[in-house]
């Protein structure tokens, strides 16, 4: 299923293949040229899904064929009464974060294209997921990470047989160094920010959630927002469900960024001039798909806010006390839920879902 690529900004189209570009000549990201939709006019009953297929149970929606899988998907959806919300536990994936949604699709595409080496830059979770699925695929991987990456994430990369490349400086410096290696021909860019297959994988969050809720969608979803990997994936998944006629509405998509690394929130609110290093997984000052994130926010009557370290830490402590052992970046979304309610953006009785994106064992 070697799907061609399209630039939504200028309309350029590129043929699929191992030497396909990782970005358009105009500098914008590429996406798959077509979005597959199921043949059925009506959604199936949940019991009709073979959940043993994991997220690949939605293969009719995916422009990528399953080649590399660890059974990922159909993460639990549980009530969180303390927050009057539901949490979707994407922290229980094989590598411990939601990034496995994108990794299974990205490495499946890499394997289908005959790629021998993949390169990725990451603060940790995406790198660990790409390393693990590369090992499953038998493909070499080099993961560019910040010099101060958490030891737990570094070990996950190393023990999967990937080569970590530590880079001094900012998170953007990590990306720049990795991109230079890609452009030098060192490997195929398996980027969670740029590679369209990654977003094909993360769109399954929306598909699973709708199926688990008998094809109803919540009023709003509050999620962490860095590169927008999950945020845009959710938007595309809910849009695909609308296009298929399986649902009839779109939830509001509400992002939460970390103060000091909040370009999308700052444009809207100028929320603060502090720094939130607790939410280390979303320290992104230049999102690759910022224009697409802005469009998704506008299309869903959504928003983006930035929170400080204290609010994030308070939410993390409360999550741990109530049985949700997650890493700090997950907590920023839960803190954001409270902040959105305080601002009046979300009503107290609104139907809200929050993804918990990474396991607490990854934060040591």
Image: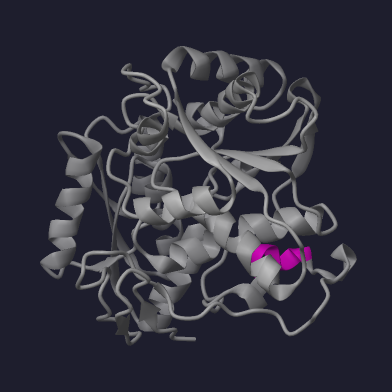
The image quadrant of residue 306 is: top left
Q: At which x and y percent is residue 117?
A: 28, 68
Image location (x, y in percent) of residue 204: 62, 61
- Residue closer to the observer: 292 or 127: 292
Count the marks: how many?
0
Spot occupied by residue 230 in the image (x, y as percentages of width and height)? 52, 50
What residue sits 73% from the left and 28% below the top?
347
- Residue 158 in the image: above or below residue 69: above
Stretch in magenta: 51-56
Give the residue at x 33% y 46%: 122
Q: Quadrant of the C terminus?
A: top left
Magenta run includes residue 5: no
Q: State whether the magenta stretch is mostly helix, strand or loop.
A: helix
Q: Position of residue 133 (x, y in %)?
A: 46, 61
Colour setting: one colour
Question: Does residue 204 sit above or below 333 in this rendering?
Answer: below
Residue 258 drawn above or below residue 163: above
* Residue occupying image coordinates x 81% and y 54%: 216
Q: Is residue 337 left or right of residue 87?
A: left
Residue 326 seen in the figure: yes
Left or right placement of residue 220 versus residue 349 in this view: left
Whether residue 351 sits left or right of residue 36 in the image: it is right
Q: In which quarter of the view is residue 291 placed?
A: bottom left
- Which residue is found at the position 25% from the left and 38% from the top? 171
Corner quadrant of residue 140: bottom left
Q: Is residue 159 visible?
A: no
Residue 52 is inside the magenta segment: yes
């Amino acid at each position: 299923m070697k799907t061609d690529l399209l630039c939504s900004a200028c309309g350029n189209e590129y043929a699929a293949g191992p030497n396909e570009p990782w970005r358009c000549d105009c500098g914008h990201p590429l996406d798959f040229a077509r979005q597959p939709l199921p043949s059925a006019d009506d959604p199936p009953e949940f019991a009709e899904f073979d959940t043993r297929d994991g997220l690949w149970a939605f293969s009719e929606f995916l422009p990528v064929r399953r080649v590399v899988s660890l059974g990922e998907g159909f993460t639990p959806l549980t009530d969180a009464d303390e927050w009057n919300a539901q949490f979707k536990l994407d922290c229980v994936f094989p590598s411990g974060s939601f990034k496995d949604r994108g990794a299974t699709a990205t490495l499946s595409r890499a394997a289908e294209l005959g790629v021998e080496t993949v390169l990725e830059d990451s603060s940790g979770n995406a790198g660990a997921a790409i390393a693990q699925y590369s090992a499953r695929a038998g493909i070499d991987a080099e993961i560019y990470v910040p010099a101060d990456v958490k030891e737990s994430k570094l070990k996950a990369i190393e023990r999967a047989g990937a080569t970590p490349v530590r880079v001094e400086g900012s998170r953007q410096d990590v990306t720049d160094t990795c991109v230079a290696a890609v452009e030098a021909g060192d490997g195929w860019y398996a980027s969670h920010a740029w590679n369209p297959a990654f977003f094909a994988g993360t769109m399954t969050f929306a598909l699973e959630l709708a199926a688990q809720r008998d094809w109803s969608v919540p009023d709003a979803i509050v999620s962490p927002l860095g590169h927008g990997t999950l945020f845009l994936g959710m938007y595309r998944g809910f849009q695909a469900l609308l296009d298929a006629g399986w649902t009839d509405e779109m939830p509001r998509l509400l992002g939460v960024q970390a103060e000091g690394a909040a370009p999308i929130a700052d444009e809207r609110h100028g929320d603060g001039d502090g720094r939130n290093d607790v939410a280390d997984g979303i320290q992104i000052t230049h999102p690759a798909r910022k224009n697409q994130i802005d469009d998704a926010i506008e299309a869903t009557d959504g928003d983006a806010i930035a929170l400080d370290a204290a609010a994030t830490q308070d939410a993390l402590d409360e999550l741990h006390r109530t049985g949700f052992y997650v890493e700090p970046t997950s907590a920023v979304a839960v803190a954001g839920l409270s902040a959105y309610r305080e601002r009046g953006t979300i009503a107290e009785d609104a139907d809200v879902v929050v993804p918990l994106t990474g396991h607490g064992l990854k934060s040591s």
